[in-house]
Image: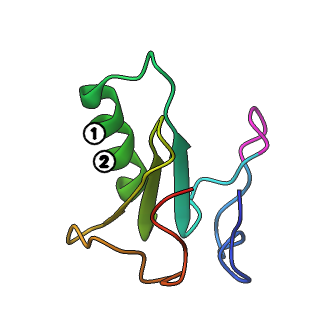
Amino acid sequence: MWCGSGRSTRPGLKAQKSSGFGERAPEICVEVLSPSNSKPEMEEKRALFFEAGAQEVWICGLDGKMEFYTADLSAASRLCPMFPGQL
């Protein structure tokens, strides 16, 4: 997980003791698919990431193809525009 400076700590928020992570998502959340992931599961995770404050969600497919999502369904990353679409 990567958080930009000032993102990982926000006034008034305390880290969750049980998980060690803050209550706010990082700017970019990345999911690497496995054969057991379903489309509805990934849609739910994507929605939860945005609800938690993520600016972008990246999904790496089994074939290495990257999908980039923003709240307005952009086809490319705005935060890292040079990131390749295929790994």
Q: In the picture provided, is 45 more to the left or to the right than 71?
A: right
Name the magenta segment's main secondary structure.
Answer: loop
Q: In the picture provided, is 41 more to the left or to the right than 29?
A: left
| Nearer to the camera, 65 or 24 | 65
Q: What residue lies at 41% left-to-right and 23% top-to-bottom?
A: 37
Q: In the picture provided, is 47 more to the left or to the right than 17?
A: left
Badge number at residue 47: 2
Helix, strand or loop for disc 1: helix
Quadrant containing the C terminus in the rendered view: bottom right
Q: In the picture provided, is 69 more to the left or to the right than 86?
A: left
Position in image of residue 29 (x %, y %): 53, 56
Helix, strand or loop for disc 2: helix
Q: Amino acid at mark 2?
A: Ala
C-alpha separation, residue under disc 1 versus residue under disc 2: 6 Å
- Label 1 CA crowd tier, 10 Å (few <14, some 14–19, many 20+): few
Q: Nearer the viewer, mark 1 or mark 2?
A: 1
Q: What residue lies at 52% left-to-right and 70% top-to-bottom?
A: 84
Asked if 34 appears above or below 1 in the picture, the reply is above
Residue 84 in the magenta stretch? The answer is no
Position in image of residue 83 (x %, y %): 55, 74
Q: Is residue 52 visible?
A: no
Q: What residue lies at 71% left-to-right and 44% top-to-bottom?
A: 16
Question: What residue would you read off at disc 1?
Answer: 43
Q: What residue lies at 44% left-to-right and 51% top-to-bottom?
A: 65
Residue furthest left as drawn: 72
Quadrant containing the N terminus in the rendered view: bottom right
Q: Amino acid at mark 1?
A: Glu
Magenta residues (range): 16-20
Would you identify the image quadrant in which residue 38 lies? Answer: top left
Are dots 1 and 2 in contact, CB under 8 Å?
A: yes
Position in image of residue 69 (x %, y %): 33, 62
